[in-house]
Image (tube, rainbow, N blue to C red):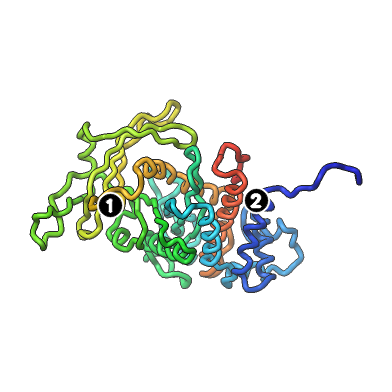
Amino acid sequence: MNNTKEAPEKPALLTELMSLLAKHELVYGQKRVFNRVLALVMAELFAFGRHTITQLLLTLGLVDEDWSAWYRIYSEGRFDEEQNGMVMLGEVLREVPEADPFVIGQDGFHVPRTSLTMPGSGWIRGLLTAKFKPGIQRGQRFVEASWFTPMVNGYSRAIALRCLPAFTQKSVACEETEPQTEVEAALTALTWTRQGMDGAGRKKQVLVTLNDGSYDTLQFWSELPERTVGIVRTARNRCLFALPTPDAHGNRKYGDKAPAPHIWLQQRKGFTHQDVVVRGKTRPMRYRVEGPFVRDELPDIPLMLIVVGGGKRPKGSRRKNYLPCFFLVSAVLVDGVWSLPLPIADILAWLWQRWELEVAHRAMKSGLGLGEKQCWNDTATVTSVQWSVWIYALMMMTGYRVWGNDCGARPPGLW
């Protein structure tokens, strides 16, 4: 009807997604390559079956065309994960004021495989086997580094920045990448993030990383980039030492041996109660801060110990109690006193948000078919996984700019 009063409007999600994709165009040398990438991104959103390349092309209706150029996007290095990640890093930096810390989380995950000859694959613990009778299966190991959006009413999201392979020494050889541990891959992602922040004029901004206990190693603490704060879960029996006293001998690097982290739980006095807002609900927490301490073979890196006592879970939970947790945090020197780099309330709140990494892994595997694409050479083996992580980052960044951190306002599904 010509006299209608309705004005056509583009959906907000589509507008934000296309705007975000347009900023990645400079990464690709040719316009036609970017157009194919753009088409595959849309196919990822509308493919309801397996997310193989064949299924994506069928979703686009490309039945009678030659598919060789589409396959070369993954096998010939047309998709540059590092450059695409740098564009995403620049976008997320716009959402964080320079005075606030830039918080990321890192965690490893496995991609199930069935081939005995696929590059990077090896034997891992069975992902679907019972804990009381664990099995083994084939799989590849990757490390994901994700940005945590600023918390609003206890809500945050994990938006992926990089996904790096962490293939083991015993896995099938891969020409695309050398074998490395999870810690080495995490340090590579941290160094890359720190350099990207410095290049964007954020040299004074603090980078904060949240890691689980597998990263509490001597290599991680000693090779942590400058102006980077590590918050890492540690073992209950971790061996720690106090700093040498001022009257100690000049050659002495360690003070007296400190109590193991779990020993602090036996002392009732010294704990402080703090209410933390998590996803719209208030969670009471009991904690104490001790230190500074140093680890054996790391006498020059002071660390603070945070002991979080256990407590009762909310009604309706499958488990009745929270287990105690122990964390090591990079210490900073303020007016001659070693202390925490951030307010304790902020640290406790961010520790709750690490679960968003697990949510992201589940969404990428169940919603985007992480690891389902055909891999016929070393480049495609790595690129196909990095592609799915990048698609998830696009979707989450688009949803974040439309809905913010209000998870309750989001429709069901990935968005």
Please say if 388 is above or below 71. Answer: above
- Name the one closer to the observer, 335 or 40: 335
Which residue in the protein does label 1 denote? 334
Q: Point out residue 368 in the picture as x, y percentages from the top left corner.
A: 59, 52
Determine the CA span between mark 2 and mark 1.
Answer: 56 Å
Q: Earlier in the sequence, mark 2 or mark 1?
A: 2
* Circle 2 or circle 1, nearest the eye: 1
Q: Point out residue 163 in the picture as x, y percentages from the top left corner.
A: 48, 60
Outermost residue, right side: 2
Q: Residue at x 68, y 52 (%)?
A: 14
Please say if 392 is above or below 409. Answer: below
- Name the one closer to the observer, 226 or 52: 226
Dot 1 crowding, Cα within 10 Å, few <14, some 14–19, many 20+ = few
Q: Dots 2 and 1: beta carbons under 8 Å?
A: no
Q: Residue at x 31, y 46 (%)?
A: 327
Which residue in the protein does label 2 denote? 49
Q: Residue at x 20, y 39 (%)?
A: 263
Please say if 80 is above or below 309. Answer: below
- In the visual, does 162 lie left or right of 294? right
Quadrant of res 20: bottom right
Q: Point out residue 269 in the picture as x, y percentages from the top left corner.
A: 21, 32
Asked if residue 41 shows in the view, the reply is yes
- In the visual, does 190 lie left or right of 297? right
Label 1: element kind: strand
